[in-house]
Amino acid sequence: MTATASLADRVVAGEQAAIARLLTRIERRSPGVDEVISALVRRAGRAHVVGVTGPPGGGKSTLVSALAAQYRRAGRTVGIIAVDPSSVLSGGAILGDRIRMSALAGDAGVFIRSIATRGAPGGLPRAALDAVTTLDAAGKDVVVLETVGVGQAEVDVITAAQTVAVVSVPGMGDAVQASKAGLLEVADVHVVNKSDRDGAARTVAELTDMLRLAPPAPGQWQVPVVSTVAATGEGVGDLIERFDGHRAWLADSGEGQRRARRTTAARIRWIAEQLVADRLRAGHPDFDRAVDEVTERGGDPVAAARRLVQRGLGAGAEDAAAGSDPPDSDPAGSDPEGSARR
Ligand SMILES: Nc1nc2c(ncn2[C@@H]2O[C@H](COP(=O)(O)OP(=O)(O)O)[C@@H](O)[C@H]2O)c(=O)[nH]1
Ligand SMILES: [Mg+2]
């Protein structure tokens, strides 16, 4: 408990080594990590969380480093989480190299980390959410999440962001690609990066036309299309103004509160799924007992499954006692939380 409190405290104090250690634990889902996150969630909520997504090679990492540089010039501290699965091989390292080679090298106001996909379904988005909470609680003014817009898990990661930027590049019908990947709907800001290339104006026009098909109701957010050249920083100041404008709209319109609820709902769901999944594997005493009961003594599999799920959600104290419960005990009778839920 003391160790937990002190790691959380050190993260809140902004200690780089503590942040790095916690992010490693989040990635590995090490024992005790949930308790640290529980302590941090209450101390987070101040950062502006910006998601940057789009196809591989669109210039997301380049854009994220340009954004970080621009934020730093404005005196704002930045945390960066790259969850591009390909970053395990290249992107994350490339992003890290870019930062190290740039004016941001050695700047304690920037923290960057890439996290890898692994483990259970929901594992990646959950880890991303916990990582964002960590950097937010550590006092970063802005937390930027880079994620490649491909699989559902990567799209889910965006749940952790307040403001979502979808990056397209000129040519090859990229706007259409984004629409296929379900990314157009999540965009709060469209970025046409590599605007130094031929066809940039056409891509802007394509996106603008598409947005015109569903004009916002009065008081709703008008999704802008911003052109950038991430490689030179052109348009990046503009982009930050749009991000800030979106954040102000979130606060004024009540949409920010709605998104906070959505994020919380996802977080609770992912934690609950993990709690249940932990029980539903050979080797867990409750699970093995249920299998014995149904196979050896003609028990009812439906009733056994219900009991397991209820116990999984009841969790906590009885976990320790799980091994000593009599096999035919009725968890609904002995578990006040379980029966209260009915
Ligand atoms: N011409 C041009 N190239 C860019 C621009 N931004 C990024 N790139 C290049 O595009 C390639 C992919 O960039 P990267 O940031 O790794 O893309 P990511 O996969 O989306 O993260 C790299 O070679 C970058 O140097 C830009 O604005 N203009
Ligand atoms: Mg990248």
Image (tube, helix red, strand yellow):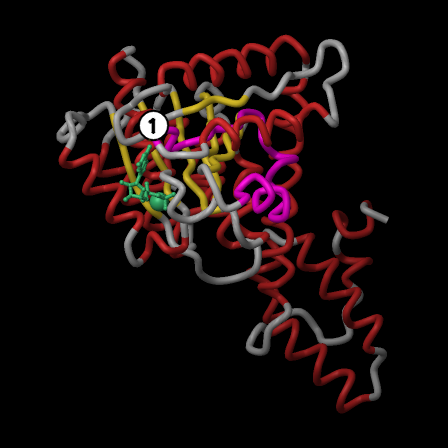
Where 247 sits versus 136, above or below? above
224 with respect to 334 (left or right): left
Q: Position of residue 190 (x, y in %)?
A: 53, 28
Where 324 sits versus 9, above or below? below
| Residue 267 seen | no
| Residue 327 seen | yes
Q: Residue furthest bottom?
A: 296
- Camera-nearest residue between 299 and 216: 216
- Camera-nearest residue between 331 and 176: 176
Residue positioned 60% across, 43% down in the render: 176
Magenta stretch encompasses residue 181: yes
Type of the residue with mark 1: Val
Q: Position of residue 50 (x, y in %)?
A: 46, 28
Q: Position of residue 53 (x, y in %)?
A: 48, 39
Q: Give the residue number, with chain letter if any, for mark 1.
A: 229
- Camera-nearest residue between 66 and 294: 66
Q: Position of residue 10 (x, y in %)?
A: 28, 31
How dense is the environment of label 1, judged by Cα within 10 Å: few (below 14), some, or many (20 and up)? many
Where 160 sits versus 47, above or below? below
Q: Secondary structure at mark 1?
A: loop
Q: Quadrant of the N terminus?
A: top left
Magenta stretch encompasses residue 163: no
Residue positioned 53% across, 35% down in the render: 160
Residue positioned 62% across, 63% down in the render: 277
Residue positioned 80% across, 89% down in the render: 297
Picture quarter with ligand 2: top left
Q: Which residues are magenta?
A: 173-196
